[in-house]
Image (cartoon, grey):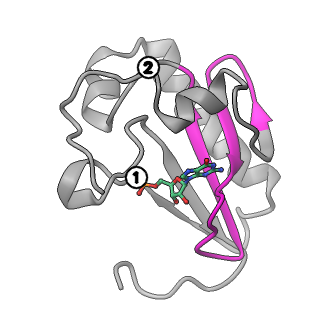
Amino acid sequence: MPIDAAQPYDDTNIFARILRGEIPSKKVYEDDHVLAFHDINPQATLHILVIPKGPYVSWDDFSTKASDAEIAGFIRGVGHVAREAGLVEPGYRLLANIGPHGGQEVPHLHVHIFGGEPLGRMIA
Ligand code: 5GP
């Protein structure tokens, strides 16, 4: 069920619980600003989620409220994960679903990294 991306942050959401270590994830990378882990229901050969550690619902929330260090850390973190996964040369896709029209289901900002195979056209 897509969420309302303008809602206040709900710290019981599944990614907040993963960040707190309350439920397991297949961790790919972690630093001061980001956590990256494999999607539980992969939509491509490689499907990694990268989330900022701060309590941000959406891109709008993050881009207006996060510090410059958090924003830089998130952008660099996504790049680092893609590079370490060997995706720079073959290429990959980034996707962020935001709000009802975007089909966002988890109300904690996340970027999907898809790769490992040709991904076809932009939107099915
Ligand atoms: P959204 O539609 O919000 O952009 O995508 C949410 C993503 O989170 C989906 O691809 C879904 O498979 C993934 N997901 C939902 N719950 C869990 C979970 O508990 N663990 C992991 N690793 N991924 C999850």
User: With respect to residue 23, does 33 lie above or below?
Assistant: above
**Mark 2 to mark 1 CA distance (whole Å):** 16 Å
Task: Give the amino acid type for the residue marked by disc 2 in the picture.
Answer: Pro
Viewer-nearest residue: 22 or 70: 22
Please tell me whether residue 21 belongs to the stretch shown in magenta: no
Where's residue 104, x and y in %? 33, 52
Residue 3 vs residue 108: left or right?
left
Image side of residue 10 versus residue 15, left or right: left
Q: Where's residue 38, x and y in %?
A: 71, 54
Residue 32 within the segment the image draws in magenta: yes
Q: Residue at x 32, y 36 (%)?
A: 58
Q: What's the magenta region?
A: 29-53
Location of residue 9 (image quadrant): top left
Residue drawn where x is 76% and y is 39% of the image: 24
The answer to whether residue 93 is left or right of residue 21 is left
Q: To which residue does mark 1 refer?
A: 96
The label shown at residue 55 is 2
Q: Is mark 1 within 8 Å of ligand 1?
A: yes
